[in-house]
Structures are given as C-alpha cells and as structure tokens.
Amino acid sequence: MAAPVGPVSAAQAIGEYLQSPDDLVKVSAFRKKLEKEKASIDTRLKIGVKEQLQATRLGLKRFLSTRENVQALKDEMITIEKECEDPSVRVATFDQISRVSMVHRNFETTEEMVNNLLAMGAQLDDIEHMLAADKREIIGPAPNLLIIHYQLNQLERFRNQTLHEAKKASPSSQATLTRWFERLNKVIAEFDEYIAQLARNVLALVRQGHSDVVVKIIKIAEIEGKEDEKAVVMRFVKKAAKLDAALKFKSLQANARVFKHYRAKIIKSITHSIHDKIETSYNRYVEDDPLKFLNNLQWLYQDILRIESDVVPCFPPDYEIYNLYLREYHKALNGVVKKVATAKTDASVLLALYEWLKEYKENMKELNVAPELMDPPLLDGNEQGLIEDYVQLIIKKLDEWSANLMKTEIAEFTKREEAPELDSDNLYSMQGGVILFQMVNQQVDLATESKQGAILARVVGETNRIMRGIQDQWVKVVESEFKKQMEKPDEVAGGLVEYCIALANDQIKSADFCEALLARLEPLVSEKYRVPITERLNNAIDGYLDIAKKCMQTLIDMIFNDLKPATKNLFQPPWYDGAMRQIVETMRDYMTDYQSYLNSALLELLVEDLMDAFIVTYLNALANAPKLRMPAAAERFKEDVTEVFEFFTTLTSTQDVETRFEVLEMVLSMLEASRDIAFLSFYNFAKVHGPNIAFVEALFKSRSDFDRSAVSDIMDSVKRKVKDEGLTDPPDPTIMKKVNVGNVFSRFLRT
C-alpha cells in the first residue's frame, strides 16, 4: 500500500527537475515554462471571479423582487380580511341577504330531517330483517354484515346531527326526537351485541371457513375506531376554538356521537370466550373427576395451531392476536389449575396435576410458544408446592385412617366381646394389619407414579412414623390390659390370651407385608433413596417383631402368673412330695390353645422363651432355696427335669430341649457332687456360663450335707480355680445372667 502524498514544497518541486549538475543548463527553459503556466492560471481565475459576481448580482435582484411581491400579497390579505370582517362596508343589504340565506338553509335542513325521520322506520325494518337473518346462524357467512353496518352508520350520523341541532329546542321537542330514535338505539345495541357474539366465535368461524366474516368484523372496528378518533379530535377543537368559529364546521357537531370502542369490545369478547371455554370444559368434569379435564386438553393445542395458521392472517399486526390468545389461554388455565390444586380432593389428582404441568411446558415448547406469553407460569411456578401438598395430603389421610383404624382395633382388643376372627389358616387374627397395608400400598403406589425417589422416600418415612406410632400404642395397650388382668382379674373381660395370640399373628403378617413392600420398592429407586427407604421399612419390621415378642412374653407371663402358687413351693418342703406335675399340666393346657391358633413361627419362639422362662424360674427358686434335704433334693431335681424335658419334647425337637436343659444338668451335677470333686463340676459349669460365684456359693450352702467348713473349703477351691484358669463371663451372656441370687435374709424368709 502506497504512502499518502502530502503537499509538495517549492524546493521539492525544483528538486525533481534539478537532479544532476547537467540540469542547470535547463533552468532558463524551466523558468519560461512556469511563467506560461502562471499566466494561464491567472486568466482562468479572473474569468471565474467575474462570473461569480454576475450570479451574485442577479440573485440579489431576484430576492428584492420576491420581497416586494410578498409584501404586496400581505397587504392584499389584510385588505381582504378587513372587508370580510365588515361586509356592510361594501354591500348595504348584506345583513338581509345573510338572514334570508340562513332561513333558506334552515328550510332545506328541516325538510331533509323530516324526510329522513319518515324514511327511518322502513330502513330499520330492512335492517332488523337482515340482522335477524344473520343472527339465526352465528357460525355462518353473515352476508348482510357490512350492509347493516353501513346503513346503521348513516342513521346514527343523522341521529347525532339532529340531536345536536335540537339542543336549543324546547324540552318537549327534544323528548319527542328522543322517542323517535329509541328504536334506532335498540337496533344499534342489538348490532353491537351481534358483533360481540361474532367476536366470541372467531375461532369457530375460521374453522367453518368463514374467515371473511372475521375480516369484516375487523374492518367495521377500524371504521368505528376512526369515527371515535375523529369525534375526540373535534371535541377537543371545539373546546379550544371559539364557539362561533366551531359552528362554521359541520364536522364539529360530532360531540353528539356515542363512542363505540369496537376494538376494545372485540378483544374483550375474545378474552371472555377463551375463559368461558376453559371454565366450561373444567365444569364438565369437576364433579366426576378433575383429572379428565387435564387429560382432555388436546383441543387447546389444536386451537393454538389453528390460531397461528388461520386466525392471525385475519387481523392486522397491531392487534397481536396470537399473543392475545396465548396469554388468555394461559391465564384461564392458571385459574382452573389453581382450583384443582386448592381443592385437594385426592392425592392422585395433585400428582397427576404435577405431571401434567411438566407435559404442558413441553408441549408449549414444541409449539414454539415464547416464554413471555406464559408469564406468570402456572401456579406461579410453584409446582414443587404440589408435591408438598401431595405428601401432606397423604400424611393427613394416613393419620386419619390409622387413627380410626386403631380406635376400632383397640376397642375390640380391650372389650373382647367376641372371640377373635379366624383367618384362612384357621388361626386367630385381627384385620388391622391387612387394612393398614392396603392403605399404605395405595399411597406408596401413588408416590411411585411420581417417578421421584425423594417423594417415595418421604412417603415411606411418614409411613414408618405411622407404623411406629401404632406399634407404640399396642405396647401400651398390651401392658395396660395385662396389668388389669394381674391386679383385678375378676373385673376385666376374658379372652386376653386369645387376643394376644391374634395380635401377635397380625404383627407377623404386617412384618411380612412390610418386607414385601421393601422388596417391591428397592429396585425402583437409586442408591441415594434406597438406603433411607430400607432403613425405615426395616425399622418398621423390627417394630412389628418386637410387638409379636411382647405378645409372646405376655402369654408366658400369664402362664407363670397362674403358676405362682406352684413355683412358690419349689425347693420348699411341699416340693419334695412332687409339685412339677401341676406346673407341667398348666403349661400343657396353655400350649394346647397356643398350638391351635398361633402362627407356627411364633410358636417356635414361644416354646423357646417358655423353656427359658421355666429354667430361670426354676434356678431362681434353687438359688434362693432354704436348706435342701440331700440326697432327696437331688432325686427330686432329677425327676423334675425329666418330667419337664418330656413335656417340652412334645413341643420342639429333642436336640433343642437338650441344648437348653444342659444348664440344668450342670447344676444337678454340682448339686450331686461330693465335697472332693465339687470344684470339678463347677469347672465344667463355669467354662460355659462363667463363674457365677454367688449362685454357686448359694447352691453349696443350701445343701444339707455340707457344713459351713465344707462350703468354705469348696468355695476356696472354686475361687482358686477361677483365678488360675482365668475364668470370666462368656462374651455372649447365657441364661445364668437372668438368675437372681437373693441375700441371706431373703433366703431366711423363705424357710
């Protein structure tokens, strides 16, 4: 790119010609050349200056001539104005001519007015006929629409002019004119209503192929709009101008016009039609099922497509008709959606509404609807509030249902007016668990339909809260009823055993239901929500099993409550005559009922707990026994163990009984052991159950064949053995931990 060329100085110009010594010879020739160029330039400049001076002189002459003409025109206009202001100066009879002219105009105006009034009735007959014909088919071609409008427009102008001119007439004349125009006013009002009806059915007209009717409506609105604008301007001019000057213009009489505001009315009618359509659709389903309304809104999307393709071309761009329809559809939907949300008739409705809102957004996005046309968003964008309402509704219903259920169940349990129901397996049962899990599964199924792990986890958490609440109630009820049974057996209703069996069976069923629910839900959620769901349901399962165990313990407690007289005599003088048969037969009677109506899994647990309870009771009696008559006591001990052993083998396996009765065999070994080998029997016992020094010492002290010295020697050997062998309690406590050894005074009281 060449560098920009700046102004060339004289030295530079000469330097271009004189670049070598030989060029000095050319200086004279170069000088002559420059003088010729200068003379040529001077000549041209003189000619240009002369031409410019001549043009300037001509322009000044014309300007002065124009100024003189303007002044002459001004003087003439002033003269004309003066002559107009005082025409009598020029015409002597101008006043008479003016009055005659005015009278003539008044006669013509009056004649025209009378003729128009006389013809108005026939015109209105034709208009009413055409209007009635068009109104019979609202969704029709409306062939007379423009004709009707034109004729009414002419009659309306006549009315406005007449009423305006009659303002100075007497009140009676004005009243007469008003009565003449009453029919016209009614027809105009009827036509306005017809326009509104057509506007409410714009979409229907387009669907039926009558787009031209919509165009006619808009054309009429434009015409009336211009008339309204003209009337506004004229009223403003009349207020601003002098009254006399205003009266010279007939158009200024427009102050009698009634403003139509057709455009605003058309938009209002379209808006009302949209809201009415949405509201009608909603009311059709609200009594039956609001979900049907949401599921039958495909017509709305079809309307949007039709509006975009067929309605928009019928309206001028400044109407922004597409935006109007979209905004009003959205606004109307928002109102209905809020009704559905606030009704809170059913949790499924809220969940379906939540899903529908997401679907609505996706559909509008596919239709390329601008976000600003959906502002504010449905439910003000608080879709998550639906989930909260949904969860709260589920909680409320579960609380109500569970409260009513427990009220009924507890009443049956405490009153015990009838025997418990028998299930299909011929076992005692209660309906609480079945009914509760029907409700729980129903609500959980609704939560799974949301496809949101957070919702499902929260519902499961609330379900766990309700289950644990029910379990706590059952614990208190069972304890309360057992306490009444123990303290006032004659004042309470019978059948507590049967109802405890029924309740225990029901708890096992509930645990099974809960486990099945957990197995169903685990595959449906991610690890994030699987953990809390598993924890909550496992917690509920543990609670049900705890209630079942509580019932088992209560059944055992009732057995031993009946056995108190017999167990009180254990290792007492009457015991030597044989007291175990009564104990065994009492347990057998109870177990016969238990075996018939108790769940088999619970029956196994009950037998194990019953064995443990017997062993603890038996060893407690032994630990706190007075002096035992040896060897008769040892023989009776053997007979007791044999008899009870045979009884329990009828309830469970021999191996299981042997395992649990092993502690009795070890105790019997210590009871039979001689002084010299007593510590060996103790060692075998201690290796399994720990030292249990207090129990062992009480056992040896109770033997009548050991004096105080012998017991002291044996205990010294025992303690040395414990120290030498490092014998301690086993890591897992054995049944000996449940054995209570009383002090010397308590044992003395039993003697």
Image: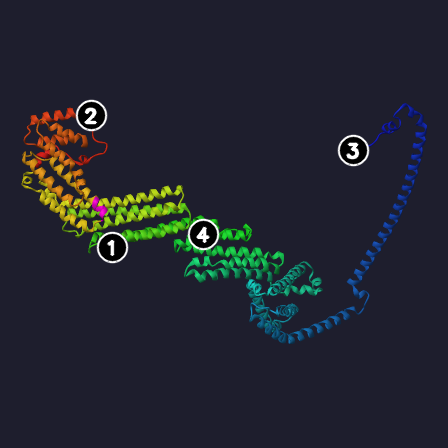
Residue 463: where, in percent of width, then height?
33, 47
Mark 1 or mark 3: which comes first in sequence? Answer: 3
Q: Secondary structure at mark 3?
A: loop
Q: Secondary structure at mark 4?
A: helix
Between residue 299 and residue 86, name the one nearer to us.
Answer: 299
Q: CA distance from mark 4 to mark 3?
A: 73 Å
SS for tag 1?
A: loop
Q: Which residue is mark 4?
A: 355
Q: Which residue is mark 1?
A: 424
Q: Is residue 281 visible?
A: yes
Verify CB contact (< 8 Å) between mark 1 and mark 4.
no
Q: Is the C-beta separation of discs 3 and 2 under 8 Å?
A: no
Identified by mark 3, the residue type is Pro
Q: Amino acid at mark 4?
A: Glu
Neighbour tally class for label 1: few under 14, some 14-19, many 20 plus, Cα within 10 Å: few
Q: Is residue 96 above or below residue 430?
A: below
Q: Earlier in the sequence, mark 3 or mark 2?
A: 3
In primary-sequence order, the first of circles 4 and 2 is 4
Q: What element does badge 2 sit on?
A: loop
Instruction: Give the amino acid type for the residue marked by disc 1 in the picture.
Output: Ser
Check disc 3 and report the residue beneath it. 4
Q: Is residue 252 left or right of residue 52?
A: left
Residue denoted by label 2: 726
Could you say where residue 163 lies in the image, as x and y percent from the top left? 64, 69
